[in-house]
Image (cartoon, rainbow, N blue to C red):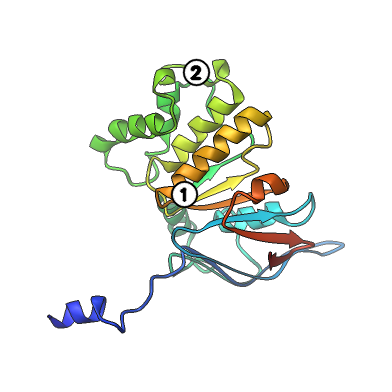
Amino acid sequence: MSLLEEIFTGPEAAPPHPVLELRGVERTFPGPPEVHALKAADLRVDRGDYVSIVGPSGSGKSTLLHLLGLLDRPTGGEYLVDGIPTVGASENDRATLRGESIGFVFQAFHLLDRRTVLDNVLLATLYSGVPRHERRDRALAAIDRVGLSHRVDFHPGVLSGGERQRVAVARAVVADPRVLLADEPTGNLDSVSSSAVLELFDELHGEGLTLVVITHDMAVADRAQRRVRITDGRLVEL
């Protein structure tokens, strides 16, 4: 065995970094009165985890989502994505890391109504480093993966809520992100559509995708392997 092989495959090889890791992260908004939206939060999400973060309105879920998604910076502590510190990184570096590492699914779908399903998914490849010659094939594969190949040329306005959320999932996974970050993914769906989206999440997790789902709904939270409660800005693993 060569020295490099021994370093990377031997018994002393370092374990992989967590996909996401909060270390004593705080987020305070100036007042008056000053608001401590997140308080000394620690969270580790490893590859292949399926984690739900559950809490009521006003608990700090939105603040946590923005921090995990690199859409905001903490006022204290450190946040690492795949072992890379992000708090002091430039906006360009954070944007690149966000595009390459994190797929987003939102409650409101955030699809472009004047673009087709294919166009909506293709747009996600433009900022995520997918080579130009692979973009269309990757988009079509992602749409097929969520069961919408028969809707590829449709516009979002003629799709059901469940179909629109599946387009959003296809857009989120087209670039093979390290983690799928979902914010109230069933909040605008009926029970049948909600069940279909959650079954899709189960399938994606079974294929090895790391998921973090932020929700107020315990029925959604209970689908995850790990459950974390957020209350008044504090995280507690259940």
Q: Secondary structure at mark 2?
A: loop
Judged by depth in the image, the label closer to the viewer, 2 or 1, is 1
Q: How many marks?
A: 2
Tell whether 138 sits left or right of 23: left
Q: Measuring 50% from the left and 66% from the top, which residue is drawn there?
A: 86
Q: Measured from the top left, where is residue 81 in percent x and y?
A: 47, 63
Q: What's the mark number on residue 155?
A: 2
**Residue hosting label 1:** 205
Q: Measuring 43% from the left and 51% from the top, which residue is drawn there?
A: 209
Give the residue type that dot 1 points to.
His
Give the residue type that dot 2 points to.
His
Q: Is residue 29 visible?
A: no
Q: Measuring 47% from the left and 22% from the top, which residue is drawn there?
A: 115
| Residue 43 vs residue 130, the one in the foreground | 43
Q: What's the mark number on residue 43?
A: none
Q: Measured from the top left, where is residue 238 in percent x and y?
A: 68, 64
Quarter of the rendering containing residue 121? top left
